[in-house]
Image: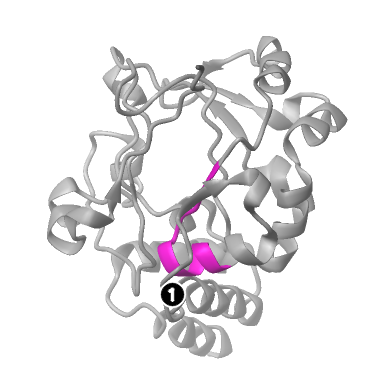
Amino acid sequence: MAAERDYRAAMEACPGHPAAENLAHLLFSQLRGKEAAAVLLGHFRDAFGPAGSDEDTPRELAAAEADAERVARGLLRHGTVLLRGCYPVAALAALAPHFHLKPDQWGKPVFRLADMDRQAIETALLSPLLRTLVPVLGLELESWPFGSWVRAAIPKMAGTRVPFHQDMFVCARKCMNVWIALDPCGPGTKAPGLEMVARHLPALLPTAQGDGNEYAIQHMEISEETVAREIPPEALWRPRFAVEYG
């Protein structure tokens, strides 16, 4: 009875949402009732708190101009922040030969960063800004090996396309997604790149279920029709990732 009470309390944070219910079931299968309820309640409360009111907080800035507090305000305001010039190209190029991508259970080419030398990864990727930002957001820097992957998005391979989704369902935890482009992508390049909703969402978006991809199978996919209906066009953002010379 206590576990059922804890479960009901957690579900009140996201009533009637099938994907949220799946997340609750997942957490309750892994944790004791009270601990799972606390994780779920905190998860949704932190993710869907009030949007930041700082109108001047940019969603894109140079890494050299950024600090942890400024980036955190940007995330609260926009849900995403693009930092230009975070990593020297040479540092990423030095890691690339060690990325031995193999098909995962869904057939997508991936490589788990935790399979590389940890010190090499942390030296190259955990910048001083990131080391400061992660604790500010209430996250643990030591958790990166559990969800860090190299993924190949190949334009001619439809199966490598990733639909709209919210990573809180994928990770079943409060998380921050750090996306590092290893090749030029986005407008004006040969690869589609990343399209995202650049706004702080007040709630979960409805998900679709089907058999077209692993996100749909796991009830995590958000259809393009839902995005078009729920999100204003100016909040859809597809930035260009490319080294500019000249």
Question: x, y percentage for residue 6?
Answer: 53, 86
Splitting the image into 4 quarters, where does residue 214 fall?
Answer: top left
As drawn, is 44 to the left or to the right of 203?
A: right
Q: Residues within 10 Å of mark 1 (few under 14, many from 20)?
A: some
Does the magenta-highlighted stretch encompass residue 78?
yes
Q: Amino acid at mark 1?
A: Phe
As drawn, is 229 to the left or to the right of 115?
A: left
Judge whether 178 appears above or below 47 on screen: above
As drawn, is 85 to the left or to the right of 55?
A: right
Question: x, y percentage for residue 166?
Answer: 39, 54
Question: x, y percentage for residue 171?
Answer: 54, 52
The residue shown at (44%, 85%) is: 8
The residue shown at (68%, 58%) is: 67
The residue shown at (43%, 79%) is: 53
Report the span colored magenta.
73-83
Which residue is label 1 attached to? 48
Q: Secondary structure at mark 1?
A: loop
Residue at the top extreme of this rendering: 97
Splitting the image into 4 quarters, where does residue 12 fall?
Answer: bottom left
The residue shown at (68%, 61%) is: 68
